[in-house]
Image (cartoon, rainbow, N blue to C red):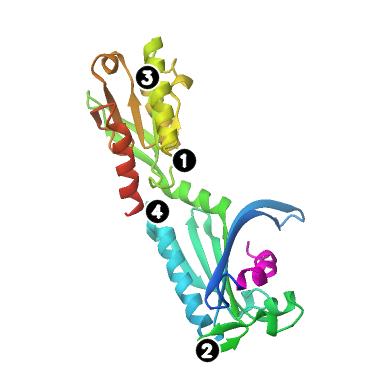
Amino acid sequence: MDSCIEHEGALEQYISWLELVKRRLPFGLAETGLSFQPDGSGSRAEATYASLVWFCSPRSSSQWLDHWARLRLQWWRKFALAPSEFSSRDVQVDELQEGASRGVKIVYSFPWGQETLENLWSLGDSDLLQTHGGVRAKIQCFDGQKLVVPHVISVVSNMDRSMMAYMHNSLQLMKKHDGKQKLYRRKVLKLHPVLAPVKVALDMGRGATLEQRQVCDGLLQEFLDAGISAWPGSIDITSSAEKLNTKYDEMGVLFTMVIDENTLESGVLQVRSRDTTIRESKHISEVKGFLLRYMRAAHNM
């Protein structure tokens, strides 16, 4: 990630997209995939990357680099529990990627020091020209009424390192007193709701009946059909409620829903929040709508 990052794929696809954008600047091509980079020991490590190659007017390339650097830092901080641990810095001249006139790094402050999550480079037009044989006519675009060869802004994120940063940023050791005023600690992976891989876990408790299983399976399918990631209650039917809550908090699960005998009689189940540990009673017909509203609000936070 800190060395030269491949963006040849987007440059090679450049020509095929020109007609779609009517040769008008600016526009960008984004992609994700695996890449193999040197790991410092002589071997090559596999990592997942996401990249944006932005094609813009030569006269505004510096402003576009500033724009994307600002926007990307805002994005990283938006989903962070401790936003100040994410920061950006300009790349010094002796650190610039080959062919780059300017660079910006988005970094995260781990306990062992800062590591780069994202590199942004202003690459000029040399790579684009080289990719297409130096033929300026076929790669030119309109900058207003003028035909120009675009400049390239490259934005590349190491998704594996980024996820590690968010997990470190979100892991908390919470202190709480129980009913007997005894202090205990619990680990909570307080990932932003948008990033939490599992939004809701279903729990039937020990000795679940066939009817409880049927309700659980139906609710699970309802959530999945609505695009809500859910953890099946049938996986952990032998664990105590306390152990399950501990497990789900460490997984970052947003809500736990308990389907018990009362649910079969009245349609009411208990909904526990990861962040507050408060349990609320909700009718089974309301929980999908509740989760969808919660997630919509989280996207706008």
Residue at 41% over, 31% down: 248
Is disc 3 in contact with disc 4, using a CB cutoff of under 8 Å?
A: no
Which x, y percent locates residue 173? 37, 39
Disc 2 or disc 4, which is closer to the eye? 2
Are discs 3 and 1 less than 8 Å apart at CB? no
Q: Are marks 3 and 2 in contact (CB under 8 Å)?
A: no
Query: Which mark is on residue 215?
Result: 3
Residue placed under numbered mark 2 in the picture: 145
Mark closer to the observer (3, 2): 2
Q: Between disc 1 and disc 4, whose residue precedes?
A: 4
Q: Residue at x 68, y 51 (%)?
A: 46
Residue 64 place in picture, x, y as percent: 49, 77
Q: Amino acid at mark 4?
A: Ala
Q: Which residues are magenta?
A: 1-18
Distance from Cα at disc 3 to Cα at disc 1: 23 Å
The reply, left or right, for residue 115 in relation to residue 272 is: right
| Prevalent SS, magenta region | helix
Q: Which of the two labelled residues, at mark 1 and mark 2, occupies the earlier sequence position?
A: 2
Decide: is 14 above or below 245: below
Q: Earlier in the sequence, mark 3 or mark 1?
A: 1
The answer to which of 146 and 296 lies nearer the viewer is 146
- Amino acid found under the numbered disc labelled 1: Pro
Q: Residues within 10 Å of mark 2 (few under 14, many from 20)?
A: few
What secondary structure is marked by label 3? helix
Instruction: Find disc 1 in the rendering and name its residue.
Output: 197
Q: Is residue 13 magenta?
A: yes
Secondary structure of the residue carrying numbered label 4: loop
Q: CA distance from mark 1 to mark 2?
A: 47 Å
Amino acid residing under circle 3: Val
Residue topped by disc 4:
80
